[in-house]
Amino acid sequence: MKILIVDDEKDVEMLFRQKFRKEVKSGMLELAFAFSGEEALQVLGSEHPPKVVYVFSDINMPGMNGLELLDNIKQQFPHIQVSMISAYGDLQNYEKAMESGAKEFFTKPIDFITLKAEVNKLIERHN
């Protein structure tokens, strides 16, 4: 199962690789990374159909923000589930994300126990 993490902060890649080390090593999970909304759409559009089944995206990014990315993904790849990540747990972003079809909304610092539970549910459904 392949998931895509989208965040303009490069250190997020190391964090996700560390937290999901076992799942990646066992072959249950493949991680892909994009550092902008535009790059995320390129990654998703590079495979037909995309192998990515889940996207975790930061909301606050330069250029296309995470909410715009969510709208684009839902239009172009409606089968891909998307969860949003925000440094700010503000109600406005939460409501807009959920109205636009986000599956979950995580705030930074990310609660990896909850996030891993979500990913493990996906892996079980995918296998």
Image (cartoon, grey):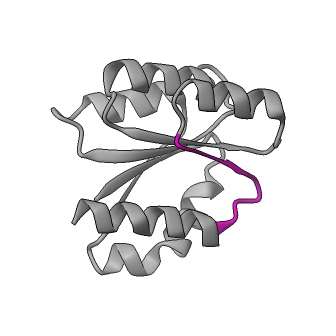
Q: Is residue 101 above or below residue 108?
A: above
Residue drawn at (57%, 20%) of the image: 68
Does 44 sit left or right of 103 as displayed? left
Residue drawn at (24%, 32%) of the image: 46
Q: Position of residue 19 (x, y in %)?
A: 55, 73
- Name the quadrant of the C terminus: bottom left
State which region is magenta.
Answer: 103-112
Q: Is residue 20 above or below residue 122?
A: below
Residue 75 painted magenta: no
Residue 110 painted magenta: yes
Residue 29 visible to an observer of this rendering: no
Residue drawn at (54%, 74%) of the image: 18
Q: Residue furthest left?
A: 48
Q: Say how many tags the image has.
A: 0
Q: Position of residue 5 (x, y in %)?
A: 49, 48
Residue drawn at (50%, 62%) of the image: 118
